[in-house]
Amino acid sequence: MNASQKDIGAYIKPALSIAPVSTDGSADVSGSGIDRVGYYSGVVVCAIGAASGSPSAQSIVFQLEESSDNSTFAAVAGATVTITADDTLGELDVDLSARKRYLRVVCTDATAFTAGTTPANIVTASIVLGGADSLPAT
């Protein structure tokens, strides 16, 4: 058994982008920017709770965005996670080698609920960075 089998924390750096918040899908929920300098791979991890308002269906859409200045962000093509079931986690593996310095997750206004009375759901998202230039990851 090698050290990586017992100490995964030395190889990854988790970072919260969207703190848990309720959304009804009427507007984007933009997460905080995360500095990925020194990391070349990552996993976007998104989660939702149980919908309120009794919708018959839901589609919660998360989008990875990038920026060179942590101010003006643009969508990373093809980097979306869609979750349709209550209390579910979704993830997306991302090659960061060609990405800009800052990353964030946005729960987009493409989020939709079908029927229900003022439906909403709690959303959250993190990025787990890996492939660090130096270890342990900090």
Image (tube, rainbow, N blue to C red):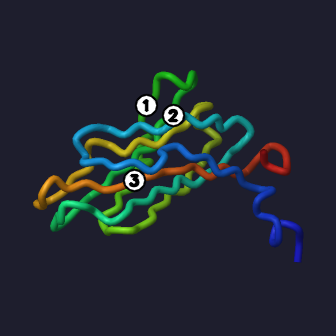
Amino acid at pointer 2: Glu
Label 1: element kind: strand
Label 3: element kind: strand
Amino acid at pointer 1: Ala
CA gap between label 1 and label 2 equals: 6 Å
User: How crowded is the residue under tag 2: few (<14 C-alpha within 10 Å), some, or many (20+)?
Assistant: many
Q: Given contact means CB atoms under 8 Å apart, are the residues at marks 1 and 2 in contact? A: yes
Give the farthest residue toward the bottom. Answer: 1
Image point 65% across, 38% down: which residue? 36
CA gap between label 3 and label 1 equals: 21 Å
Front disc: 3 or 1: 3
Which quarter shows the N terminus? bottom right
Q: Quadrant of residue 47?
A: bottom left
Amino acid at pointer 3: Val
Q: Which residue is mark 2?
A: 66
Front disc: 3 or 2: 3
User: How crowded is the residue under tag 1: few (<14 C-alpha within 10 Å), some, or many (20+)?
Assistant: some
Q: Horizontal and vertical percent for residue 2?
A: 89, 72
Give the farthest residue toward the right. Answer: 2
Image point 44% across, 48% down: which residue? 79
Which numbered disc flags the more N-terminal residue, 3 or 1? 1
Tell me the number on the disc at residue 74.
1
Above or below, comparing residue 95 to residue 1 in the picture: above
Residue 91 placement, left or right of 80 = right
Q: Given contact means CB atoms under 8 Å apart, are the residues at marks 3 and 1 in contact? A: no
Q: Which residue is mark 3?
A: 123
Q: Horizontal and vertical percent for residue 21?
A: 39, 48
Above or below, comparing residue 40 to residue 60 in the picture: above
User: How crowded is the residue under tag 3: few (<14 C-alpha within 10 Å), some, or many (20+)?
Assistant: many
CA gap between label 3 and label 2 equals: 20 Å
Which numbered disc flags the more N-terminal residue, 3 or 2? 2
Which numbered disc flags the more N-terminal residue, 1 or 2? 2
